[in-house]
């Protein structure tokens, strides 16, 4: 009887620890919260679940391609206003406004499920491919500004807007850190 109670207690402790660990992993950090707020402000029509999904995609793409999630998020805000179905006059598609005609072959090679431009509205595919392009631009340049200039095809205005948004997000980080002290 004593062994049975001990066994049940042990199981209970393991379950509680597992739930606590899972909750800790799901708790968003400052960067995720800041990006969430940025996306919500830029496109208030988005529901909370969609915003969370986009934040998770940005964080995963940043990790995979070793790019700052703040830069990715700022590109999304200024290129598409966080609209996954955005299409520019020049033929740029999705959240990161990737030029379909320029990258069509590479997109189809990397993502076989993408057959036509409208398939590229898938948020995960678009952000991951856009971040891959950003990563390639970063490898060719000395700094973030240079990478953004390459990414935007030399767009001074969009580069300045993205950099300003990144600075705002970084300032939010500093404000949180100073509150904790």
Image (spheres, grey):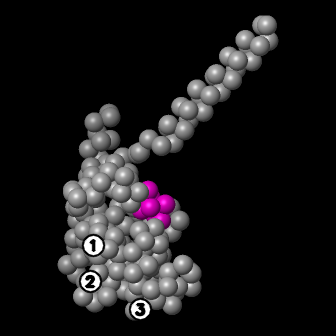
Main SS type for the magenta part? helix
Question: Alpha-carbon neighbours of circle 2 within 10 Å: few (<14), some, or many (≥20)?
Answer: few
> Is residue 97 left or right of 25 when viewed as pictured?
left
Residue 160's tag is none
- Secondary structure of residue under mark 2: loop
Relative to 116, does residue 76 appear above or below in the rendering? above
- How far is disc 2 from disc 1 in space, using C-alphas? 9 Å
- Return the residue at label 1: 80
Q: Residue 129 appears at what percent x and percent y?
A: 46, 76
Among numbered discs 3 and 2, the one appearing first in the sequence:
2
Q: Tell me if I can see residue 14 in this picture.
A: yes
- Return the residue at label 2: 88
Q: Residue 37 appears at what percent x and percent y?
A: 27, 52
Relative to 111, does residue 38 appear above or below in the rendering? above
Among numbered discs 2 and 1, the one appearing first in the sequence:
1
Residue at position x 45%, y 67% in the image = 124
State the quadrant of the C terminus. Answer: top left
Q: Residue 177 appears at what percent x and percent y?
A: 32, 41
Quadrant hosting residue 140 = bottom left
- Return the residue at label 3: 102
- Residue placed most toward the observer, 145 or 118: 118
Q: Residue 150 appears at what percent x and percent y?
A: 36, 84
Q: Residue 90 in magenta?
A: no
């Amino acid at each position: 009887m004593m062994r049975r109670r001990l066994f049940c207690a042990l199981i209970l402790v393991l379950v509680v620890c597992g739930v606590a660990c899972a909750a800790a992993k799901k708790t968003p950090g400052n960067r995720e919260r800041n990006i969430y707020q940025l996306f919500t402000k830029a496109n208030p029509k988005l529901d909370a679940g969609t915003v969370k999904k986009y934040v998770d995609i940005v964080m995963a793409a940043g990790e995979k391609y070793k790019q700052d999630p703040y830069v990715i998020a700022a590109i999304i805000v200024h290129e598409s206003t966080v609209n996954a179905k955005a299409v520019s006059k020049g033929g740029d598609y999705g959240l990161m406004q990737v030029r379909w005609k320029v990258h069509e072959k590479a997109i189809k090679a990397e993502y076989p499920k993408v057959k036509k431009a409208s398939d590229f509205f898938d948020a995960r595919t678009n952000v991951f491919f856009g971040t891959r392009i950003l990563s390639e631009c970063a490898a060719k340049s000395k700094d973030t500004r240079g990478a953004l200039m390459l990414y935007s095809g030399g767009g001074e205005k969009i580069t300045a807007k993205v950099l300003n948004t990144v600075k705002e997000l970084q300032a939010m980080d500093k404000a949180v850190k100073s509150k904790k002290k």
